[in-house]
Amino acid sequence: MPIDYSRIVTYSPAYTIVPTYECFNRCTYCNFRTEPGKSPWMSLSAAESILKQLQSQNICEILILSGEVYPYSARRQEWFQLIYDLCGLALSMEFLPHTNVGPLSFEEMQKLKCVNVSMGLMLEQLTPKLLNTVHQHAPSKLSAVRLQQLQWAGELQIPFTTGLLLGIGETEDDWWETLAAISNVHQRYHHIQEVILQPHSPGNQQTFNAPPFDPHQLPEVIAKARQILPPDITIQIPPNLVKDKQWLLACIEAGARDLGGIGPKDEVNPDYPHLQEQALREILQPAWWKLVPRLPIYPQFDSWLSEELQTSVRRWRNTLNPVSLL
Ligand code: SF4
């Protein structure tokens, strides 16, 4: 039977490696961070034993997700080298790395491009109001710094994922403004693969005392985002944060087409376990949606990679998902 490409929803079979939970920012909604110097960094040998166990599990993407070390700290170089080496290790073991570790210098980004098939950074919200509230003690959440990352990624031809965090004290107009900014930078460089719409979902560690973003509002936001964003940008929603099956389907009907990395743990929202592939399939299939695994790089960007990375990507395109080009 021919595949109806308009009814495909993708996800990335992924595992998250965390080089360190320490972070010099203190976003009040954070459920991830530890104080600088208070938790050990992941060693390469520990990462290697984790990755060895994953080799038989059809996991393609290794998401390298880290807390941030202050850019002028004496430990920044060591932190960066660890991230670089973890990506290299994942590649050498035939995984495809995607790094999301906060704002980087142009040179750091340029180096990581050599060992990543794509990279990411959430814009969250551009409004400067949040610098007086949830981001009061989060110097790297300056909107100019984050927008510049999107621009540098474009200049360096790095396929990029970004997104909005919804419900942290912004207004509806702030959403449209942030989406328009993403759209503008994409129209210049054509490098944004996906925009994540992440509803704020309170966790046990955070100090920010606000209700969760109402998931019933999400379909409306997705539909409007679909109008603002260019059609070649996919909208992603995290299914573990949209608990109600009907509303998850409503989000897809409204234009979301990707469910992001599905792995054993959502490190950013550890209180919200992921539904695994089969459970997601059981929600989607009765509504005639087909769940299909994808790589952490979309096919239109393959030619931006080095020959070596293209070889690794090709191997996965042939094995993970021979029925489609995803
Ligand atoms: S949300 Fe990210 S940047 Fe903010 S404190 Fe947590 S780990 Fe750091």
Image: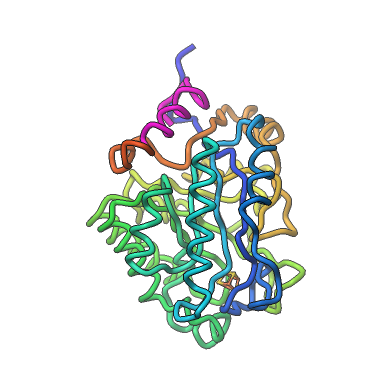
Give yes or no for residue 53 being in the magenta stretch: no
Give yes or no for residue 315 being in the magenta stretch: yes
Between 292 and 169, the one nearer to me in the picture: 292
Q: Residue drawn at (37%, 47%), measured in percent from left and top?
A: 233
Q: Residue drawn at (57%, 63%), measured in percent from left and top?
A: 66
Q: Residue 58 at what x, y percent from top left?
A: 61, 31
Up the image or down, 306 lies above or below 58; here it is below
Q: How is the image coloured?
A: rainbow
Q: Is residue 205 left or right of residue 143?
A: right
Residue at far top of view: 1
Residue at far left of view: 188
Between 91 and 321, the one nearer to me in the picture: 91
Q: Is residue 314 left or right of residue 236?
A: left
Up the image or down, 219 lies above or below 289; here it is below
Q: Residue 225 at what x, y percent from top left?
A: 42, 55
Q: Residue drawn at (47%, 44%), measured in percent from left and top?
A: 255
Q: Is residue 43 left or right of residue 271?
A: left
Task: Please provide the residue range marked out in magenta.
Answer: 310-326
Q: Residue 163 at what x, y percent from top left?
A: 47, 59
